[in-house]
Image (cartoon, rainbow, N blue to C red):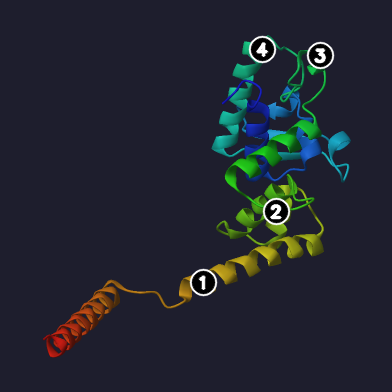
């Protein structure tokens, strides 16, 4: 990973696991992160709903913040932002949305993923809600609490789309598939057909020979 890419890399990781809005995520300060208690707090000033919301950190997210500290020390940065600007002249400000979106677009292109307009980080938010729903004891309200969204209609729309995709995948996986036995039978039939064809050609050649 290049020194200029770690911010975007870990922002995508946090987006996938925690499902916050990108504005709140980019504006995290070190005072919002408690690695001992394994919590992170989204401040109301950067939250769309204007709420201050603490959230437990999965293990991978704790690792993310520890690595961010290593990079900050390496860059000689001692400011408040977890994800500070990538350029020397922008380090007093948080990493920008434009830079994050550009990295995401480049990642999509490298991976051959079709770009969907307006998906951006919102796609990770939906993914996180779906993962919370599928966790043991998960439900729509719990999924909303996890990503900080209390609009049940919006959540239902998120999760319904996921359910439709999963049903489509289940249908594909339920389609008749060739078993090893079927493959052997098909190969045997093909071999027998080829042998009969060759035998018929041999007989034809013999009948027309001088």
Q: Which residue corresponds to the image point at 82% horizontal and 58% vertical from the top-left?
A: 151
Q: Going from the N terminus, do you reach mark 4 or mark 2 first?
A: 4
Q: Quadrant of the C terminus?
A: bottom left
Q: CA distance from mark 2 to mark 1?
A: 23 Å
Q: Compared with residue 78, is residue 65 higher up or lower down, i.e. above or below?
A: below
Image disc number at residue 75: 4
Q: Which residue is mark 3?
A: 89
Q: Are marks 1 and 4 in contact (CB under 8 Å)?
A: no
Q: Which residue corresponds to the image point at 87% horizontal and 46% vertical from the top-left?
A: 49
Q: Going from the N terminus, do you reach mark 2 or mark 1 first?
A: 2
In this view of the protein, which residue sits in the foreground, 127 or 28? 127
Q: CA distance from mark 4 to mark 3?
A: 13 Å
Q: Which residue is mark 2?
A: 126
Q: CA distance from mark 1 to mark 3?
A: 52 Å
Q: Going from the N terminus, do you reach mark 3 or mark 2 first?
A: 3
In this view of the protein, which residue sits in the foreground, 77 or 87? 87
Label 2 residue SS: helix
Q: Are marks 1 and 3 in contact (CB under 8 Å)?
A: no
Q: Which residue is mark 1?
A: 172
């Amino acid at each position: 990973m290049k020194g200029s890419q770690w911010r975007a890399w870990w922002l995508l990781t946090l987006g996938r696991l925690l499902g916050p809005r990108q504005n709140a995520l980019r504006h995290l300060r070190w005072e919002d992160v408690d690695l001992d208690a394994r919590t992170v707090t989204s401040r109301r000033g950067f939250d769309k709903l204007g709420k201050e919301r603490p959230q437990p950190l999965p293990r991978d997210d704790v690792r993310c913040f520890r690595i961010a500290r290593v990079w900050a020390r390496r860059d000689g940065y001692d400011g408040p932002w977890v994800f500070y600007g990538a350029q020397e002249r922008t380090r007093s400000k948080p990493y920008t949305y434009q830079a994050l979106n550009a990295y995401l677009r480049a990642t999509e292109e490298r991976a051959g993923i079709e770009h969907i307009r307006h998906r951006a980080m919102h796609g990770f938010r939906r993914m996180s809600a779906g993962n919370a729903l599928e966790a043991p004891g998960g439900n729509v309200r719990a999924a909303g609490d996890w990503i900080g969204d209390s609009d049940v209609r919006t959540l239902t729309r998120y999760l319904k789309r996921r359910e439709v995709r999963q049903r489509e995948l289940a249908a594909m996986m339920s389609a008749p598939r060739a078993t090893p036995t079927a493959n052997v039978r098909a190969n045997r039939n093909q071999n027998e057909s080829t042998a009969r064809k060759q035998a018929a050609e041999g007989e034809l050649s013999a009948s027309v020979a001088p």
